[in-house]
């Protein structure tokens, strides 16, 4: 399970409706609501600067948060919607959903690469090219893996590591149905350049031949 779920600190908000929401924004806060989990909805507010910083960091809507509100027990939530100003594109409201430990959610899990020194391709000067430093997995809120591990042992130049070659944590599965690439071992730069030049010569020759055929016609 993930070592630490990030905190999202909020304050309880009094008053509902458009008027109360506008007043909240005037005080530098973003209004929101927490729903689900067989409990009554809870009106909250989050400092605008804090929320804006989290949004800019990315993955806000696919991150599991530990919501802390004074006077209430901490609860795990995931963002279901962030409403924005149509002109300024700034957050004006957010919806958070409470999660049970058994709730299935899709989250981005970091990828760890091991045994790079045991890869023949790396020993020959190849470079490990990471295509996906994170993989989106469906998992339960109570059993979120800290990472997935890709073993590079035995990989040669031009070999690829796909999701099907990785042993995923129990109870998880990728959100993408196809067998996608996570990383590969690329040829050394000099070798890749030579190959590219040869490929360009072949393309040029093909183009000349095609043009000649069209002229004959």
Image (tube, grey):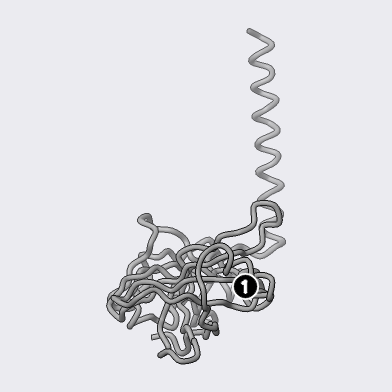
> Which one is nearer the viewer's eye here, 53 or 169?
53
All told, the count of numbered labels is 1
Q: Residue drawn at (27%, 77%), measured in percent from left and top? A: 102
**Residue 185 in the image: above or below residue 46:** above
**Mark 1: secondary structure:** helix
The answer to which quarter of the image holds residue 80 is bottom left
Side (left or right) of 72 relative to 19: left
Side (left or right) of 198 relative to 140: right
> Which one is nearer the viewer's eye here, 18 or 141?
18
Query: How many residues crowd mark 1 within 10 Å: few (<14), some (14–19), many (20+)?
Result: many
Which quarter of the rendering shows the C terminus?
top right
Q: Residue 31: percent from the left, percent from the top?
A: 56, 71
- Residue 190 visible here: yes
Q: Residue drawn at (66%, 23%), measured in percent from left and top? A: 209
Q: Residue 115: percent from the left, percent from the top?
A: 49, 82
**Residue 211 in the image: above or below residue 55:** above
Most extreme residue toward the top is 217
Which quarter of the rendering shows the N terminus?
bottom left
- Residue 156 visible here: no
Can you identify the residue that label 1 sits on? Answer: 24
Q: Residue drawn at (31%, 79%), measured in percent from left and top? A: 100
């Amino acid at each position: 399970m993930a070592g630490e779920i990030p905190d999202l600190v909020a304050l309880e908000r009094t008053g509902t409706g458009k008027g109360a929401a506008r007043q909240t924004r005037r005080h530098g806060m973003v209004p929101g609501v927490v729903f689900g989990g067989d409990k009554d909805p809870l009106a909250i507010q989050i400092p605008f600067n804090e929320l804006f910083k989290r949004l800019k960091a990315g993955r806000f809507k696919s991150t599991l948060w530990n919501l802390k509100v004074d006077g209430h027990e901490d609860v795990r939530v995931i963002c279901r919607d962030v409403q924005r100003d149509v002109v300024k594109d700034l957050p004006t409201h957010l919806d958070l959903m409470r999660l049970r430990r058994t709730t299935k959610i899709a989250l981005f899990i970091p990828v760890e690469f091991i045994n790079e020194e045991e890869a023949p391709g790396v020993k020959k000067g190849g470079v490990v090219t990471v295509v996906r430093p994170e993989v989106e997995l469906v998992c339960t809120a109570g059993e979120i893996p800290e990472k997935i591990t890709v073993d590079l042992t035995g990989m040669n130049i031009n070999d690829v590591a796909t999701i099907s070659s990785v042993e995923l944590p129990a109870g998880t599965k990728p959100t993408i149905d196809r067998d996608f690439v996570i990383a590969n071992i690329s040829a050394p730069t000099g070798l890749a350049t030579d190959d590219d030049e040869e490929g360009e010569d072949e393309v040029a020759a093909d183009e000349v031949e095609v043009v000649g055929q069209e002229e004959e016609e």
